[in-house]
Image: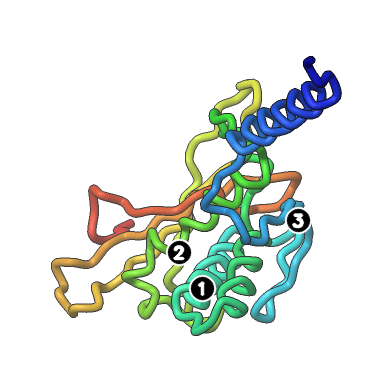
Amino acid sequence: MIDKARIRMALGGTSLLLIALIASCNRDVRLAGRNVPSVKVRTVSHFGLTLDRDSSPEPVAFVALKAIREDVLAGNEKDREAALAKQFDVCAANIIQAKNRSSIKRDPYIYNVVYHWAPTVSHYVDNFDLDWEQAEKRLVRRDPPQEEGVKGQFEKCTVLMELDDPTGDAGARVVMVLWLARDDGYWRVVHLGFDNTSRSIGT
């Protein structure tokens, strides 16, 4: 005789397993055990600078780069998480999410984008400035033409900085580029990389 209670229990267990498998497909297993924040764009203060809606892009870029340097040079996980938290504070979270064309949810998507900032430029962190007065002399802002009347258009710019190669090879100098945009009225970093067409900023 068939035990109906056991059948119901078996079917219930199978349903729960399917739900768990479906849910796991929407999660990045590499984020297991990590503190994935829900980033809010807001006024923050780091390294003696307050970054509010009146702040220009250059100090935002400086804070991002100094936080990345702390991330790369961190000696333990606690310091690394603290440095990463500062990077989240200066990321253009809403704009980054607006560019999300994957099935990954908002918070893990933003985490993955910002988490990879440090590896992208880690080779050059010893050439980053430790104080704002020195960094201000090296950071160069460029404003692209803004397209009038384009739906979804937002104010954006780039901040450039020349970086010497750690080997001392003058021919290996690079130009790092930080792409920034106004997110809810704040200048914040969207992503960063390098200008592959030039080794100096020029005029």
| Rendered residue at 60%/47% (across/down) | 110
- Measure how far apart labels 3 and 1 are at the Cα level: 26 Å
| Rendered residue at 14%/67% (across/down) | 171
Circle 1 sits in a helix, a strand or a loop, which is it? Answer: helix
How is the rendered protein coloured?
rainbow
Circle 2 sits in a helix, a strand or a loop, which is it? Answer: helix
Q: Residue lying at the far front in this picture: please name it.
A: 1
Figure check: 95 above or below 164: above
- Tag 1: amino acid: Asp
The answer to whether the residues at label 3 and label 1 have Cβ atoms under 8 Å apart is no
Q: Which residue is mark 3?
A: 53
**Mark identifier at residue 71:** 1
Q: Earlier in the sequence, mark 3 or mark 2?
A: 3
Circle 3 sits in a helix, a strand or a loop, which is it? Answer: loop
Residue 155 drawn at (x, y percent): 62, 40
Q: Earlier in the sequence, mark 3 or mark 1?
A: 3
Residue nearer the viewer, 151 or 117: 117
| Rendered residue at 81%/23% (across/down) | 8
- Tag 3: amino acid: Arg
Residue 80 drawn at (x, y percent): 56, 74
Foreground mark, 3 or 2?
Answer: 2
**Mark identifier at residue 118:** 2
Dot 2: few (<14), some (14–19), or many (≥20) neighbours within 10 Å?
many
